Image: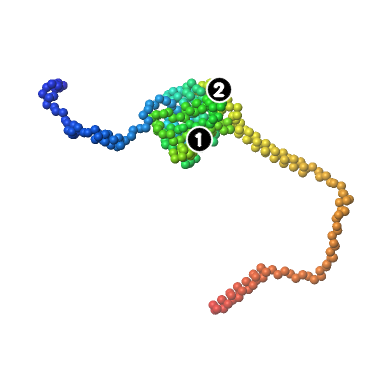
Amino acid sequence: MAATKRKRRGGPAGQAKKLKRTEKDAKPPAKASDVAEEAEGEERDRIPGPVCKGKWKNKERILIFSSRGINFRTRHLMQDLRMLMPHSKADTKMDRKDKLFVINEVCEMKNCNKCIYFEAKKKQDLYMWLSNSPHGPSAKFLVQNIHTLAELKMTGNCLKGSRPLLSFDPAFDELPHYALLKELLIQIFSTPRYHPKSQPFVDHVFTFSILDNRIWFRNFQIIEEDAALVEIGPRFVLNLIKIFQGSFGGPTLYENPHYQSPNMHRRIIRSITAAKYKEKQQVKDVQKLRKKEPKTILPHDPTADVFVTPAEEKPIEIQWVKPEPKVDLKARKKRIYKRQRKMKQKVNSGNAK
């Protein structure tokens, strides 16, 4: 390789270089008023930067996935929640044979500290797990009355990725287990501020209300003009079963005494229908027995004919003359029609000859 020559800074080559003068340097110095006007014009023409310039500190990440055997409605609900929560992550369906403790390892692999897991049983019952992975606590719910975004077709709408307001029923602060659920729901459903995938706007609200010992979830749009609420969807009802100390297991902190399993509910409905059928059969058997019983003949009451008035006897008339036969009009018309047809045939044959 040939050695390259170095140019010395103090040499003639360095001195021969002249600095290029820009157009701004060539102009005479501007006045202070002109400089202020130019600055104002630049401010007007400048494109505003992003609204949020803060730092993303709340590193909440939610893993939303399900077990195998879910139906289309559950799949659509899961997709709606992922769309409404920009800080969520997805994963493949988990095998039903695996134990629930495996989910903690999946959360660790996905770098998630919260989890929403949909567990399907008998292809008709849906359970939802809300868990703080890996230390707990966790809650198990029965999901009822599911209505997805595509099914509802509401008039409300919101920006994808915008941050929601969370509205809770005052009953959440009255009982300790509801207060625990409130904190868990806040940490899961609230979008972290300055999240990279979120938008710096608040245009919808998640409402959690307690009615009939169940938690009712609704999603509403906030209209800017008059701050009215228009429902967007989805909507579902959570029936609390148990609250565990650990993540997907551990000691039971609370058990809902009002909870009735779907199997028990179906069993009660079957028993009611069976009782109705048995009652009908018993009524039929009683009617058959009554028919087979001999009829009791009551003795004749002599006072029963006291108020009976005998009918007037009509005189018997003997008819000596044979009555005239009734004229059959239909047969008569047929005979007349046949006679006319024969006459026409004779006339037509005579004209032909």
The correct choice, above or below, for 146 with respect to 337 in the image is: above
Residue depicted at 52% across the width and 29% down the height: 128
Indicate which disc, 2 or 1, sits on the residue closer to the N terminus. 1
- Which residue position is annotated with label 2? 253
CB under 8 Å between discs 2 and 1: no
Single out the residue that lies furthest toward the right. 302
Q: Left or right: 346 with respect to 230? A: right
> At label 2, which amino acid type do we have?
Leu
Residue depicted at 67% across the width and 69% down the height: 329
Residue 278 falls in which quadrant of the image? top right
- Place of residue 110 in the rendered image (x, y in percent of width and height, measured from the top left): 42, 25
Residue depicted at 37% across the width and 30% down the height: 52
Residue 145 falls in which quadrant of the image? top right
Residue depicted at 13% across the width and 21% down the height: 10
Label 2, label 1: how far apart the Cα atoms are? 27 Å
Element at label 1:
strand
Q: Which mark's residue is nearer the viewer, 2 or 1?
A: 1
Element at label 2:
strand
The correct choice, above or below, for 83 with respect to 339 in the image is: above
The crowding category of the residue bearing disc 2, from other C-alpha atoms within 10 Å (few below 14, some 14 to 19, many at least 20), is: some
- Which residue position is annotated with label 1? 218
Single out the residue that lies furthest toward the left. 12
> At label 1, which amino acid type do we have?
Arg
